[in-house]
Image (cartoon, rainbow, N blue to C red):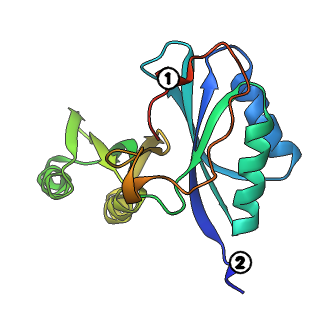
Amino acid sequence: MSEHLIYRHVIAALVTNEPGVLAQVAGMFAARGFNIDSLVVGRTENPLLSRMTIVVCGDNAVLEQVRKQLQKLIPVVKVVDYKDAAFVERDLMLVQISADAHKRSELIELASLFRAKVVDVSDDRIMIELAGAEDKIEAFVRLIQPYGIVEMARTGVIAMSRGNTNTGSNTPTAGKVAEPQTSAVNLGDLPPG
C-alpha cells in the first residue's frame, strides 16, 4: 500500500552543456505525462556540464520511471535521486510587498526572524530576498500575505548531497547513478552527488 503514497522527489541530473538539452528533458517529461514541480538548470564547475535539479511528485513507481527515462537520454551523463540520502536544498525568492511607513517596521522584523534581507524600499513597497528550504519560504509567504503581495519570483529548488558522497551513509540511493552516455566528458571530473 505504501507504494501508492504520493511523495515529493528531488532528482539531480548532470547533462552536457549544449543547446536543446533542456527542451529534450522537458519533452521527455511531457511525453510521458510526468508533472514537473520545479526545474532548475545551472552551470557547474566543469564548463562542459550543467546540473538540472528536478522536483517531481508521485509514488515510488513514478520516481523509478522518471529516473529510467532520464538515464536513456543521450545528453544525460549522471542521474542521482535523493530518496534515501541526506541532502541540502535551497530555493530563492524575491517578493515585493505593499508596505506604507507604518507596516514597514513589522515587515523588516518579520524578515529578520526568517534571516531574509530587505533589498529595496520605496514609499509604498518593500522588496525582500529569502533563501531556504521550500517549507521555510512557504511559511514566510503565509505570514506576509495579509500585508499584500504585489509580486513574487522564485528560482525553484537546487539540491546537493551532504558531506562526502563517495562513502558511508551519505551515499545516494544505490543503483541510482546512470552509466555515462557520452565520451565527451571525463567521468573523473564529475562532482559528487
How much space separates mark 1 and mark 2, taking CA atoms?
36 Å
The residue sitting at 16% across, 49% down in the picture is: 104
Residue situated in front as seen by the camera: 163 or 116: 163
The N terminus lies in which quarter of the figure?
Answer: bottom right
Residue, far right? 31
- According to the picture, the residue beneath numbered tag 1 turns out to be 188
Residue, far front? 167
Residue situated in front as seen by the camera: 190 or 93: 190
Compared to 32, does 22 lie above or below? above
- According to the picture, the residue beneath numbered tag 2 turns out to be 3
> Residue 145's spot in the image, x, y percent?
38, 61
The residue sitting at 73% across, 78% down in the picture is: 4
> Residue 12's spot in the image, x, y percent?
56, 42
Q: Amino acid at mark 2?
A: Glu
Q: Mark 1 touching mark 2, by CB under 8 A? A: no
In the displayed structure, does residue 139 sit left or right of residue 107?
Answer: right
> Residue 19's spot in the image, x, y percent?
70, 14
Q: Nearer the viewer, mark 1 or mark 2?
A: 1
In the displayed structure, does residue 116 sit left or right of residue 88?
Answer: left
The residue sitting at 38% across, 55% down in the picture is: 168
User: Helix or strand or loop: what does disc 2 sit on?
Assistant: helix
> Residue 97's spot in the image, x, y percent?
33, 47
User: Helix or strand or loop: what does disc 1 sit on?
Assistant: helix
Label 2: few (<14), some (14–19) or many (≥20) C-alpha neighbours in 10 Å = few
The residue sitting at 44% across, 42% down in the picture is: 151
Residue 109 placement: quadrant = bottom left
Compared to 66, does 84 lie above or below? below
